[in-house]
Image (cartoon, rainbow, N blue to C red):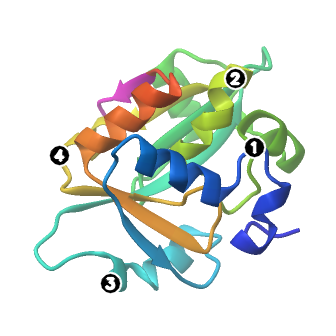
Amino acid sequence: MDASSAHQDSLPLSSDALLERLRSWGIGFTYHEHVPLRTVEEAKSVEAALVEPGEVPFRLKNLYLRDRKKRNYLVTLEQDREIDLKALGAELGIGGLSFGSADRLMEFLGIRPGAVSPLAMATGVETGVIFYMDAAARNADRIYMHPLVNDRTIGVTPEDFERVLEHLGAEVHWLEL
């Protein structure tokens, strides 16, 4: 199965159910449907249609990682930030970082490759995933991310993003990179 909304009912939490939760919490967001996006490069092809004129957006690159001790991490960075896993591990004080498998991604974050997003902490909180996010997101007008599927993108203000994390019970470790 791919990571599109056509298969959202096979996820622990569907995209539709997540969006309904956001609405019930009073979270305002922009909503966009588009072709399935699997990479940052593919995302860049549709970005112009998402961003409002004059807006300072924060576009994400999400990494699902594991360490030698089998702890799971979701690391969300600005999409154009260069990443060296060894250097990132040193910055975080974590040794032996590597990418997690697709099976573990589903087990620990409830999503498929191509749809990794901070919103997956809806499942990650329950499975002990540790969440790190680029502090530069706090300076954006809007943060853009997939709502658990890769053919939809929502945009939220940094303030509403932090409210979402509070509702999810997700602790965020802000990275000053």
Mark sitting on residue 139: 4
Vertical order, 131 against 145 (above or below): above
Q: Disc 2 designates what residue? A: 126
Q: Amino acid at mark 2?
A: Glu
Q: Amino acid at mark 3?
A: Ala
Whether pointer 2 and pointer 1 mark residues with C-beta atoms closer than 8 Å, the reply is no
Mark sitting on residue 48: 3
Residue 120 shows in the view: yes
Q: Amino acid at mark 1?
A: Gly
Q: Position of residue 171 (x, y in %)?
A: 46, 20
Mark found first going from the N terminus, 4 or 2: 2
Residue 32 colored in magenta in the image:
no
Vertical order, 28 against 124 (above or below): below
Q: Amino acid at mark 4?
A: Asn
Report helix, strand or loop for mark 1. Answer: loop
Pick whichever, 60 or 21, lies toward us.
Answer: 21
